[in-house]
Image (spheres, helix red, strand yellow):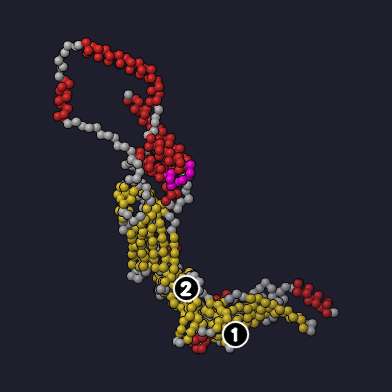
Amino acid sequence: MVIRLFVSVFLLLLINPVMAFDNLTASVNKNPVLVGEYFTLTITADGKVSGEQPDTSALTQQFVTGPINVGSRTSIINGSMSSETTWQMQVLARKAGTFTIPAFNVAGKRSTPIELTVVPRSEDAQDQKDIFVKAQLSPSTLYVQQAGLYTVKLYIGKDLLDGQLTAPEINDAQVTQMGKQKEDYEVVDGRRYMVITREYLLQPQKSGSFTIAPPVFNGQVRENYRRMAVSAIADDINLEVKPIPNDYQGTWLPSELVNLSEEWQPADEQVTVGTPITRTITLTALGVTQEQLPDITLEQIIGIRSYPDESDRNQLTRDGRVISQLVSSHALVPQTPGTYTLPEVKIPWFNTVINKVNYATLAERTITVVADPNQPLTSLPIQAQVTPQQNVEQPLANMLTPPIAQPKTGLDWLLMGSGYVLWLLTLAIWLIRKPKTAKSNTQVAPLPTTNNVLAKLKVALGQQDAQGFYQALRALASQESPTLGLDAWVAQFNEPELSSEIAKLQASLYSNSNQSADLSKIYQILTQAIKNQATGNNTHLAQLY
């Protein structure tokens, strides 16, 4: 009999997952409750309910709510079966007063509303002394997207067993916890407290008046060998958010202080061609996040190549303020000698103290680029010696004066005959050796110094030494054309691919670039260009003779 009854009940539960129920009730475990104290809201249906749950979204307008936990229970007493379904959630009131928990609907049944009284915490002075929360916002007024620092301090005067501290809440703003919480001890009114400090970065996204809902603490402490539930909440903070001024131009950067500084390595005002200069610019701003700092770009200057490195961004808090910093490095490589003026760097920002646009600037700077004295120079053409006019006139006059004929002796005739014989012998030797000499004259022999530098290039190529290869290139350019830099000398060959590969080589050496130059291609194109230039010059000279 009993077995048949259980089988019937089991089949009935499978066939009817949703049973009809008569009543739906709602209740709270505390009434009245303290401000910032969690209480339990329970909604009960006297039957098994599957697939449905009450809509509690109306509670979020006045309370802080947690997740809903669903439970069900079935019992059989004296052959009579009964079921019950419950929904439970934790609810917290942030303000004192009388509130109405609305009615809930499940499967066509409706609960009765609940009148809830929330008592201010000032009426519970003892608990307020044991555990309390303080909150502070700095600065007290903000502009749109300006970063404020919201600091929360939880003071605990008893032995804490466990607890939970919620985050502050505000509409139309980003709230982000900064770092980990800090734990310390302070003495307040002669009593020692453990203090837990948390910092939040608060950035409003819209202008207007807002209220920051403070964090709430709920936990358990030990008192006289027993566990006690405790709670605490900070006061609300009203925040006025100002809009972006209509006349502001550029990237929006609201701050109390913005500063630009720079470092040069080397710090000399005079550098040599090809020597890389590292220019490090640091942008520091107060009251903004590191993502808000604008990138720093430098104008391109003819004669100096610029290779930007990756920027480094940092953020910290100090004295109740958010401080952000951007460090941007640039490698400057002078290509030709001369005097260059680097233009000023100017970044606009809005001063939230005086409500006015300011500029963070770096003054223009002049540097002098000189030729590298350590590089070999080609020998300069020897200038012809100009003889003064008075020294030329007398020999010329003597050459124009007809000589006086003198009678020739036998010795004179012998000397003349010997001269003719020697001339004939010289002519015969020249005719015999003429083909070999002509062939050797058509060959182009590079300058010994050029061969030496090309040999260094080839050695660096074999070792895949990009730095040594580039230094040998500079030496060759300085040797072949002392007044021009490497880029100008290479441009004379009219080889765009050669110029492109050398630019990649410089970028790989002096910037954080992923480009890599083909040293073999540079060597092949360069040696062929030098050979073509030399062949063209010799052909031109041969036509003159």
In this rendering, is residue 148 above or below 429?
below
Say which residue label 1 marks.
Answer: 227
Name which quarter of the figure residue 407 lies in: top left
Quick check: is 465 in the magenta stretch?
Answer: yes
As drawn, the residue found furthest toward the right would be: 1
Say which residue label 2 marks.
Answer: 199
Residue nearest the observer in this picture, 493 or 426: 426
> Looking at the rendered structure, which numbered label has been put on residue 178?
none
Question: N-terminal of the two: label 2 or label 1?
Answer: 2
Residue nearest the observer in this picture, 188 or 82: 188
> Looking at the picture, how far across and down is residue 44, in whole percent?
66, 80
Task: Tell me the magenta residue range.
Answer: 462-470
> Looking at the picture, how far across and down is residue 466, in whole percent?
45, 46
**Callout 1, which amino acid?**
Arg
Crowding at label 1, few (<14), some or many (≥20) Cα neighbours within 10 Å? some
In space, the residues marked 2 and 1 are separated at their CA atoms by: 29 Å
